[in-house]
Amino acid sequence: MAVPSEEGSLLHAPSSNNYSSLSRQSSSYKPLHTFTLEKEKHYQQQYADMYFLRLAKLKPAVEQVAVEAWDGFQIAGETVRQVERVLDVRQGELCWVAGTIYMDMPLKPNILEDISKDHWISAPPPRQKYLSPEGQDLVMLEDESGRLRLIGPPLADEMLVTGCIIAVMGTENANGDFEVVDIKVPDLPPQSERWQTSEPAASNGKKKKVEAENDDEDMDKPQSSGKKIAIVSGLGFSGTDSAHNLDLGLLTEYLLGEALDPITQKSVSQISRLIIAGNSISTESDAIPQDATGNTRKAQKKYGYDSSAYNPAPTAHFDQFLCDLLPSIPVTLLPGASDPANTSLPQQPIHPAMFSQARQYCAAPPAAAGGEDQQPGWFDTVTNPWEGEVEGWRFLGTGGQNLDDIFKYVESEDRLRMMEAMCRWRCCAPTAPDTLWSYPFQDDDPFVLKSCPHLFFIGSQPEFDTASIEGPDGQVVRLIAVPNFSETGELVLVDTETLETEVVRFQVS
């Protein structure tokens, strides 16, 4: 009888090989509280103040771009001139003016009509696009003085939505419409250098000096390169979809470095932070509790609350997912449209009380820690939109509502182009508050970009896409459309030195 070799036998002596232990790279992280609302919120003010604030903040920037482009410009011997207000435009005179775009679209949702129809008709399904097939859509330019209708071929080439600030050059015709010859946008705002976004100048200088002194010592250390940030969106915890649960289990094992070969484990150890960009809880019908026969369980209402409409399983599974990851990797959590947070933008952080296990990794409350300048916790629940400094780069990210709403205004299917347009408009949510629910700001519009981000990501998108855009003053922005994990099974990795991206896909056949 043949004796099996030692290599092919399950029973053999323990290996004497020594395996080196891996430790995860540390994360340099500082959230910015750009979109944090006050504890006392008031809704008595008018939404119109937001448009006036936005125009007042961006009008000087777009006028500067327009002056540089159109100063001394002539058509048929007539020199273009600037007019301060929309009502100052005169028929037949070549001029340019800056203002706010308003899209008059019959298919846009109307809150007054919705309220009046609510008592006698069922709610219509959400529209994929607001565009009218009969061509009834009108493009308006308005300011505090009035409104002017825009026409002309340049409008077809320029992506425009309600709320963006632009400057238009042309002339008013006999019908009172403004025939557009050219269009200018504010373009990218100023961009700070790496490590100078939110850290004090003294510490930056000290840090750079130390790094410069230790360059020779760190040449052979892996910490100087290869570090990555993981971004995922649309986890869609429902608690009932077994196939999707397997994908989430593979994601957990990957991020923890389990059940992988040593080469992959070493690569995973370079992931220093996980960013979850919205829609972690599913809103599909399978998230509603059902009985053994598959029928929705009926529960008796008590004090107006229907317990059958709530299923704690998705939140509990998400909490367990976070609890499994947090001992190994820090997590930044943005809320999304389907998450337990306020609906209007900016969405405030999901309360840690929702996570009975993971909340132990959160920072102490500001009152106990001595103010908002405290260090963030290992588990950081943040706003949507969110700004922060990660590895010295300024990150700006959203859960996807802003891009999904802009998608309905335009014919294009290119979502990266829409992301680029938001950067060049200097506004990350231009359609708020027209068709995108928003808090009625009265003193400031936080959606206006004061500083250009180095990386701009938007979650819950149909597919992954990325590009790099440049500004007139050398600004460079990495755009990332983060795919919906529940539909694609994809995780995005960003290199912290080059901001280049790669995708890891998880799939159970």
Image (cartoon, grey):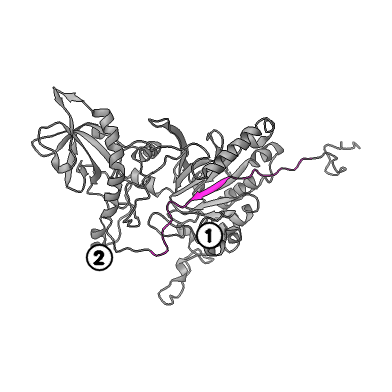
Q: Which mark is residue 314?
A: 1
Which secondary structure type mostly characterizes the magenta part of the structure?
loop
Q: Is residue 77 visible?
A: yes
Q: Is residue 440 left or right of residue 474?
A: left
Q: Nearer the viewer, mark 2 or mark 1?
A: 1
Query: Which residue is denoted by mark 2 in the rendering?
Result: 120
Residue type at the position of mark 2? Trp
Identify the element where label 2 is drawn. loop
Front residue of this view, candidates 248 and 434: 434
Residue type at the position of mark 1? Pro
Looking at the rendering, which quadrant does residue 62 occupy?
Answer: top left
Q: Is residue 34 magenta?
A: yes
Front residue of this view, candidates 442 and 309: 442
Q: Which residues are magenta?
A: 19-40
**How many discs mark residues in the rendered view?**
2
Of the numbered discs 2 and 1, the one sitting upstream in the chain is 2
